[in-house]
Amino acid sequence: MAAAFAKTQHGRVASSRAVQPCRAPLRVRAVATTAKKDSSSSAVAKSNLTPEVAKDLYYDMLLGREFEEMCAQMYYRGKMFGFVHLYSGQEAVSSGIIRALRPDDYVCSTYRDHVHALSKGVPAREVMAELFGKKTGCCRGQGGSMHMFSAKHGVLGGYAFIGEGIPIGVGAAFKSAYRRRVLGEESSDSVTCSFFGDGTCNVGQFYESLNMAALYKLPHIFVVENNLWAIGMSHMRSTSHTLGDADFPYIYKKGPAFGMPGVRVDGMDVLKVREVALAAIERARRGDGPTLIEAETYRFRGHSLADPDELRSKEEKAAYAARDPIPQLKRVMLEQGLASEDDIKAIHDRVAAEVEDSVKFADESPKPEKGQLLENVFADPRGFGIAADGRYRYELPGFTSGTAAVS
């Protein structure tokens, strides 16, 4: 299949010789958008911001923040189990990129995936119920905090091991391109975004995926959410400098090495993120290939709710807290006449009600039955055999607990 794809990606006729994936020479560059500060009016224009879009971005960021803060409360009350990694502080990245996507586009996430799912349209009820381990969750209670998935909303999963989701995202992008270029489905122009952290950029899957995405000019966007810390390891200590940079180990500059644009953006400013996202999405959708985005951001809590967060300095935390993306957008909306104080209050009321409703729904939802453990394990449930009465053995009373009588 890959060979056929390679031979047709530029509309060339297949020859009898092995055809290598090829592409026209590209002039790509690494661009740091944080170097120049835009006025609020300039940022509004560049991000194609209308009152409707501004309110949606504000709503989405606020929902992500309030949802995560409620998760902390529920975790400490014993409603959630295992590791829970919160996204508070990084909302501008999720909202700025995912809200610019179409419903038929795809997103691949990490273990910090709750807000990515919310931004992509998964109902807060389903995400909270999943965190509670309930049957009504988006994975029927079997995924939990680190494994949000929704086929309906194009969420291809959260992944506990770093780097796991990137090849999945590249595969989804390959599917879109293959259908369009080989099967002739002109409507197949969906884009995939893979999100991951700075620590992931030091593992092999990242570089393998950059290579394949560039090689086949796939409609894929690599989004590095650089919050400066890989659990407790500082980015400054774990990543080597790129292209002779002495001040900071930049990640976005790795893009041009693979033949794709690399862009660094202020990940605490949703309008700047949206501006970069729109350009990358347009590039991918028209068939010009992938983009590597490095979003400089910061998480306001520890790595997980089990992390005492003692390694980061108070000064560093305070500096980023002063750049909180939610008040920033509120200020721009009011200054530019995109919303009134009443509009802002209405959004806060809507979010508060939605979060409270999600908790009530999750708490009252049923737990999964034990028999659910046997689903989605084998392709054919008849692999367990047929009992004497003609039923599948997995349907026998006690089968899940191992007490069923099996001949």
Image (spheres, rainbow, N blue to C red):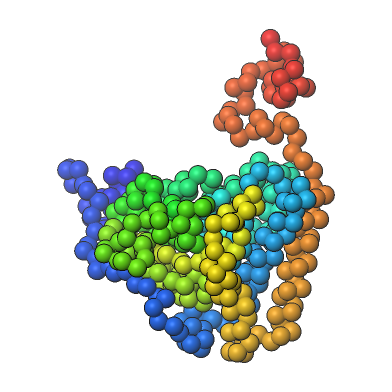
Q: Is residue 130 visible?
A: yes
Q: Residue furthest top?
A: 407
> Is residue 277 rendered to the left or right of residue 49?
left
Considering only vertical position in the picture, is 382 above or below 9?
above
From the top left corner, tell me how far across and down residue 324 is, in percent: 59, 73
Residue at the (24%, 59%) spot, across then down: 23
Across the whole image, how many numbered discs are drawn on residues? 0
Seen from the viewer's position, the closer of residues 260 and 70 is 70
Residue at the (54%, 45%) spot, across then down: 160
Residue at the (26%, 64%) spot, across then down: 244
Considering only vertical position in the picture, is 73 above or below 204?
below
The quarter of the rendered structure image containing the C terminus is top right
Q: Quadrant of residue 291?
A: bottom left
> Is residue 351 rendered to the left or right of residue 87?
right
Q: Is residue 120 visible?
A: no
From the top left corner, tell me how far across and down residue 135 is, in percent: 73, 43
Q: Quadrant of residue 31?
A: bottom left
From the top left corner, tell me how far across and down residue 339 is, in percent: 65, 85
Seen from the viewer's position, the closer of residues 120 and 160 is 160
> Is residue 108 rendered to the left or right of residue 132?
left
> Is residue 295 rendered to the left or right of residue 149?
left
The quarter of the rendered structure image containing the N terminus is top left
Residue at the (74%, 45%) spot, across then down: 134
From the top left corner, tell me how far across and down residue 368 is, in percent: 74, 38
